[in-house]
Every structure is written in C-alpha cells, then in structure tokens.
Amino acid sequence: MAEFTATPMKAKPRKVLVILAHTGSGGDTQSIFNLLSVLSLEGFDFHFLSYQRGVTHTNFQRFGKIYTFPLDEKPLVRRIMRRFFLSTFEWLKNRYGRYLIKKLNPDFVYLNTVNENEFSSAAVQSGRRFVVHIHEMGFVVTQRMRPAWIETLVNKAELVISPAQAVSEFYQDVYGLQKDKIRLIYETVDAVRLEDHNPGTSFRAAHNIPENAILVGAAGSVIYRKGVDLLVNACAEIQQLRPEQPCLFLWLGGYPDELQRQPFFRSIQKSIARKNLSEHFRFLPYTPQVSDFYGHLDIFVLPSRMEAFPLVVLEALLKEIPVVAMDVAGVREVIDQQTGYLVKDQSSEGLAEGIRYFLESQDRRKTAGKQGRARVLEQFEARVQAPKWLHLLQNL
C-alpha cells in the first residue's frame, strides 16, 4: 500500500487593518509607508482605511486595498453635509468605520495616531484587538485632545508603539500608560526611497541658487509648532554676523495656494520682508522627491518647538547632512555632538549659534554627516527596524 504524505497547509496571511489619519506627506504616514516596502514581502494581508485623502493616497495601493468614507469622495455632498448636518455626517462616518471593521474581520487593527476621529473611535468601539502607534506628545496632545479619549485609547490598546523613550515617559506620567504595554520602536527611513531621483539635474540651477552659496534647509508644515519664525530670526542673526558668506535658507513644505490663505504664513512673509531677508530665505513647495532637496544641503535645521521623533532628521542624516536641532523629546535620542548640534535653550539665538558652528568648518559638516548616516543605517533604516515589527505583528 502506497504511503500517503500530507502536504503541509500554508499558513493563512494575517489580516491587518491600518487606520490612517491621512495619506499626506506627514512623518506619521511616511514612516509606516517606509516600513511597508519591507513588511509587504512577509505575507501580511494589509488593508487601509484613511480618514482623509492626501498626496500619497494612491501609493498605498501598492500594498493593499485602501478605503475611504464614500461621502468624502463626493466633494459637493461632503461640503453640504458638513456645513448643515455635521453630527449626522460624523455619525455616518463612524458607522462606516464599524461596518468595515466587521466586514474585513481583521486579526487586529493598527491605529497610526492617537488623534480622535470617527474611524479611531470605531476601532475602540468595535471590541477588536488594536495597537496604537504614537507620533504625538507634549502640548500637541494636552492642548488639542480630550484627556478621557487618550486615557481610554492607551488603556484599551493591546500594545502601544512608542517612537522614543521620551514619548513613552510622557504617556506614562501624564496618562497612566502601563509600562508593560509599551514597545519602543524608533521611526524608520527607507534608504532605497531616498536614492537620487534626478541625478543628472542641477538643483541649484533649477532654483537659481548661486554655486558658492551655503544651503541651510528645513522641512515640514508651515505652522507655529514647526518653529518657522524661529528659523527666520536665526537667519537674520546669521546675516548680521556673517554678511560676507553667501548663505541661503530653504524651507520645504506646503503648497503655494494653500499657504497664501494662512495668516501665520503671511505673518512670516512680513517678518522676512521687515528683516530684509527676501534674498536669503525661500519657501519651496512640497515634493515627494525629497532626496533632491536633502542631497544639495550643507546644513539641516529642525527648529520645532515640539516633535516626538521627527522623520526629517533621519532623512537628512541619511544624506550625510549635519543637523542642528532643538533639544525636544525624542530628538536627543538621535542627535548629539557626533551627528549634529542640539540647541539646549530652544531659542532662535541658540539655533543661530548651532548653524554658525557648522558654517565655520566644512570638515565639521562632513564628519558629522558621515557619522549621522552611519547611525541611521545601523539603527533606524527600514531593513533594520523591520524584524522588530515582524516580531510584534506575528505575535499579537
């Protein structure tokens, strides 16, 4: 009688519903996108539910099906509903989130923010297991979010993923998060995505920048928290103290039409004009090809008043650019005297001092840049971080 050998059944892929606050250009979205390029090769069945459509929306389709609230895709209906029937609109959006969670029946839900919205509420109400990835801390949380919501969220979550030790301590101290629920996994950057997109083009020529000008760059939304005003003040001080050295400050982020409607941006423009900095400070519109921006900088600056763990710092270091950064939250866990300059007093004068430190010496810039890239590749690159995520996702 012939022997029968059973063929091992292939394990069913774990289904994960990823709930995103948006599919925009923010670091929270970009960080998970960086990981997906690696995690998608490991057999997970990813689905995405986005609260708000953004510029990277279609990119997520490479990794799984992406859902949005149907009424959000009908601009006229959405405007009418939100203006005259807001509570009904929000109720319907929450019900859609709960319906989708029940229909998909995921092994667990991943929330990519602590923000309270109809979809994150649906995840908590569904009774399904969920994990929360924290990207916010400090006054960004305490002044914008309901304490009861944050406490409920972190206490009901199966696990809470923290991008920095400082972030973990904040949620433990302020919201009573239990230490054994926390998993420390740093934000991650994808070296492949940051390869040069247009190596044959001249960034300086495209933006009419003199070849002898030293470029000091920053990136992010043009909002108060990001410290644009502090960088403008630092630029003014640099121009007064080193007028003989051509130095151009560039801020990457935002869209021209939208920025012109923002009072804060208009106030920044007035400040630039008042300080006679129009030839020394420019805004560049957001582009997904950030490598072309970072690759031509001499110094990168993070003037933010609060950041949990900024992805832009990792991106700059990966391109061997030294970083001058405010000493806030998780920033100090990647930036030190080997990789950059920490501004302890968090002032515009301190920023100017840090920038001057690197302006004075090309050797300092090169040394810090090389050490920064080595640290990112060793600790923060997607292929280094992926095993930690795999262990977490496979053992939930």
Image: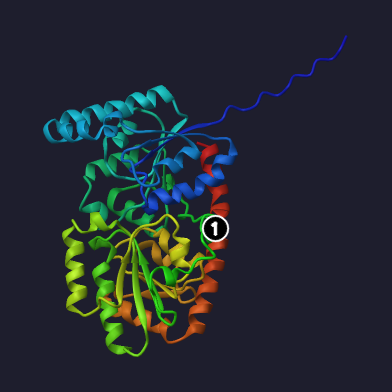
The image quadrant of residue 324 is bottom left
Camera-nearest residue between 92 and 194: 194
Q: Is residue 334 visible?
A: no
Residue at coordinates 40% horizontally, 22% vertically from top-left? 103
Q: Nearer the viewer, residue 269 or 140?
A: 269
- Residue 171: x and y in percent read 33, 52
Horizontal side of 287 relative to 85 (left or right) equals: right
* Residue 251 placement, left or right of 264: right
Give the crowd class for mark 1: few <14, some 14-19, many >=20 residues within 10 Å: some
In the rendered image, residue 96, in percent from the top left (x then y), is placed at: 30, 26
User: Which of 221/256 is in front?
Assistant: 256
Q: Is residue 95 above or below residue 183?
A: above
In the picture, residue 49 is in which quadrant?
top left
Q: Amino acid at mark 1?
A: Ala
Residue found 21% across the figure and 80% down from its top? 276
What residue did someone put label 1 on? 191
Is 307 placed above or below 211 here?
A: above
- Position of residue 215 relative to residue 221, above or below, is below
Q: Which secondary structure lies at badge 1? A: loop
As drawn, 126 above or below 276: above
Rendered location of residue 322, percent (x, y) = 46, 73
| Residue at the farthest left position | 84
